[in-house]
């Protein structure tokens, strides 16, 4: 609405100035053309060229030309439009020079054509810059939201894994101990209490894994390593799970992520064994290869092996694979086997002794050459 009012004001001023210097009959052709350019040009280079032609052929006033040039500067954005505008200005100058003097033509071109074009172009660039800044701010805002969501996901993952690795294991041990108390010969009241404890513990374990399923993520922080494996096996032995740990080959250092993954593999294997086959012997085997550790946890299948939620094995895979390892599990021959292959850390190659000697010799020779040549160069420059 404001643009239409501005166009009407420009048209009125232009027609009044044109009528003051031209006969009234000339308005019959000039006014409709001026109105068409003022209201329908929309800053197109063709409309700008038409306004220049109208001004050159009729000797019209300049308010309309200023308005159209300003709108053209606002809308011109491509090289093609710029070429059309430049060509139109060149043609207008050529025609006007024939009709008027050169200084007058140059002054009119600068004031009534070039200046409105540049003002429109500047304002258009400012608008595009503001739009680009707003778009950039929106993008940064979305990125901040994504980072916040990622941090929340990492925190949820940390809580889920801590619950699974620590609380889940301890609840499984409590369940095993409660199941061990379900023996014959107990009074009815005590037997009912023991059964209630075992049922409540199993229900708590199930609810815990359901909660873990809603909190799981894809990344986590390293935890304990193989150095804590003996203490972990001792906890399960104290809970009534016969655990045997054996190793073969020469032990080699593991990267921190692989070390933590190895511990979690043992922990998950023992927890599953205690949960699905309580009281049955579990074997943990560490086979050290030249470039990898093959870790195997084996236990007999329970009488009624249950299908768990799978969160523990999925979490193990998310720990083992980023560390460059491989995880597999199988149940055959009445036994469940959990196998992990983890790469050992590659030691940094030591710098050869010959290389160090050569580097030292080169440094000594270079220093001696500088001590000899630098004073000679200074003396030559002085002389």
Image: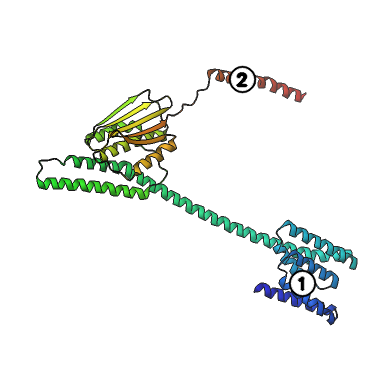
- Res. 42 image quadrant: bottom right
Residue that badge 1 annotates: 64
Q: Residue at x 43, y 49 (%)?
A: 151
Front residue of 217 and 334: 334
Residue 103, label in figure: none
Quadrant including the C terminus: top right
Q: Is residue 271 left or right of residue 158?
A: left
Is 55 placed left or right of 143 in the picture? right
**Can you tell which of label 2 and label 1 is closer to the viewer?**
1
Q: Position of residue 250 (x, y in %)?
A: 38, 23
In the displayed structure, would residue 56 be above or below residue 213? below
**Residue 265 drawn above or below residue 99:** above
Pointer 2 local density, CA inside 10 Å: few below 14, some 14–19, many at least 20 = few
- Mark sitting earlier along the chain (2/1): 1
Q: Residue at x 74, y 74 (%)?
A: 10
Describe the element under mark 1 as helix, strand or loop: helix
Q: Position of residue 334 (x, y in %)?
A: 28, 34
The answer to which image quadrant residue 333 occupies is top left
* Residue 362 numbered tag: 2
Which x, y percent locates residue 24? 83, 82
* Residue beneath the point at 38% across and 45% down: 158
Q: How is the image coloured?
A: rainbow
19 over 341 or under it: above or below:
below
| CA distance separating discs 2 and 1 | 81 Å
Q: Residue furthest bottom?
A: 24
């Amino acid at each position: 609405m404001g643009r239409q009012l501005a166009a009407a004001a420009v048209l009125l001023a232009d027609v009044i100035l044109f009528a003051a210097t031209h006969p009234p009959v000339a308005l019959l052709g000039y006014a409709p053309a001026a109105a068409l350019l003022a209201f329908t040009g929309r800053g197109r280079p063709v409309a700008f060229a038409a306004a220049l032609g109208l001004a050159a052929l009729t000797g019209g006033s300049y308010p309309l030309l200023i308005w159209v040039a300003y709108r053209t500067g606002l809308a011109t954005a491509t090289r093609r439009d710029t070429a059309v505008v430049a060509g139109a200005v060149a043609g207008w100058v050529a025609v006007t020079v024939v009709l008027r003097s050169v200084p007058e033509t140059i002054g009119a071109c600068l004031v009534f054509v070039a200046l409105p074009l540049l003002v429109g172009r500047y304002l258009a660039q400012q608008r595009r810059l503001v739009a680009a800044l707003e778009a950039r701010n929106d993008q940064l805002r979305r990125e901040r939201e994504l980072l916040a969501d990622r941090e929340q996901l990492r925190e949820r993952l940390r809580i889920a894994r801590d619950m699974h690795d620590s609380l889940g294991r301890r609840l499984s041990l409590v369940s095993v101990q409660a199941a061990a108390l379900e023996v014959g010969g107990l009074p009815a009241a005590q037997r009912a209490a023991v059964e209630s404890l075992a049922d409540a513990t199993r229900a708590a374990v199930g609810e815990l894994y359901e909660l873990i399923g809603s909190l799981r993520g894809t990344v986590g922080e390293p935890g304990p390593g193989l150095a804590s494996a003996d203490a972990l096996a001792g906890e399960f032995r104290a809970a009534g799970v016969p655990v045997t740990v054996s190793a073969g080959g020469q032990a080699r250092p593991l990267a921190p992520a692989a070390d933590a993954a190895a511990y979690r593999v043992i922990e998950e294997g023992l927890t599953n064994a205690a949960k699905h086959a309580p009281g049955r012997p579990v074997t943990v085997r560490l086979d050290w290869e030249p470039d990898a550790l093959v870790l195997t946890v084996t236990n007999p299948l329970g009488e009624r092996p249950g299908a768990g939620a799978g969160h523990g094995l999925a979490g193990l895979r998310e720990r083992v694979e980023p560390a460059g390892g491989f995880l597999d599990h199988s149940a055959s021959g009445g036994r469940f086997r959990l196998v992990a292959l983890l790469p050992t850390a590659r030691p940094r190659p030591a710098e050869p002794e010959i290389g160090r000697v050569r580097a030292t010799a080169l440094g000594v020779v270079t220093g001696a050459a500088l001590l000899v040549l630098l004073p000679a160069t200074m003396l030559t420059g002085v002389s």
